[in-house]
Image (cartoon, helix red, strand yellow):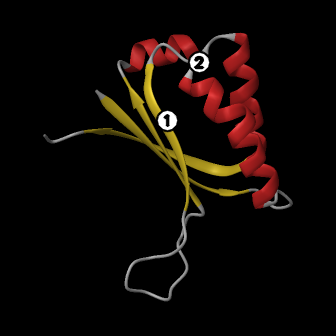
Amino acid sequence: MTTLVVLFNLKAGVTPGDYEQWARTTDLPTVRGLPSVAGFDVYRVSGILGSEAPSPYAYVELIDVHALNDLFADIGTPVMQKVAAEFQSLADNPMFLVTEQLS
């Protein structure tokens, strides 16, 4: 299984309330319903452990994927194209990290 780790901040003018409402009502239920996705969670970053410095990212998404090729097929659907476009309008230059568990 592959886990995508998505790190991002919000674009200027997007409030946390607006993003989080969209995430709860649109992003989370839609992505969790994809056949290629085993799990999907969104986290608000509250700080850096042991530091007063601000986090470089405000949000983290963890997406557990059965197979990346299947995810790419799912993303190609009209529903996911709409969700992806909405996400891109909210998130400022999100970084998608592809990871594999060591075991």
Q: Residue at x 49, y 89 (%)?
A: 52
Q: Residue 88 placed where, x, y %?
A: 72, 40
Determine crowd level at label 2: few under 14, some 14-19, many 20+ residues with C-alpha closer than 10 A.
some
Q: Quadrant of residue 16?
A: bottom right
In the displayed orientation, state which residue is furthest to the left: 103
Observer-nearest of 30 and 14: 30
Instruction: Tell me the tag on residue 75.
Output: 2
Three-letter code, disc 1: Phe
Q: Helix or strand or loop: what does disc 2 sit on?
A: helix
Q: Residue at x 49, y 35 (%)?
A: 40
Of the two numbered discs 1 and 2 on the same chain, state the one appearing first in sequence: 1
Q: Which residue is mark 1?
A: 40
Q: Residue 22 placed where, x, y %?
A: 76, 41
Q: Quadrant of residue 89?
A: top right
Number of numbered discs: 2
Observer-nearest of 55 and 50: 50
- For the C terminus, which image quadrant? top left
Q: Residue at x 82, y 52 (%)?
A: 18
Q: CA distance from mark 1 to mark 2?
A: 14 Å
* Rendered position, 10 above or below 35: below
- For the N terminus, which image quadrant? top left
Is residue 35 rendered to the left or right of residue 85?
Answer: left
Determine crowd level at label 1: few under 14, some 14-19, many 20+ residues with C-alpha closer than 10 A.
some
* Rendered position, 14 above or below 73: below
Three-letter code, disc 2: Ile
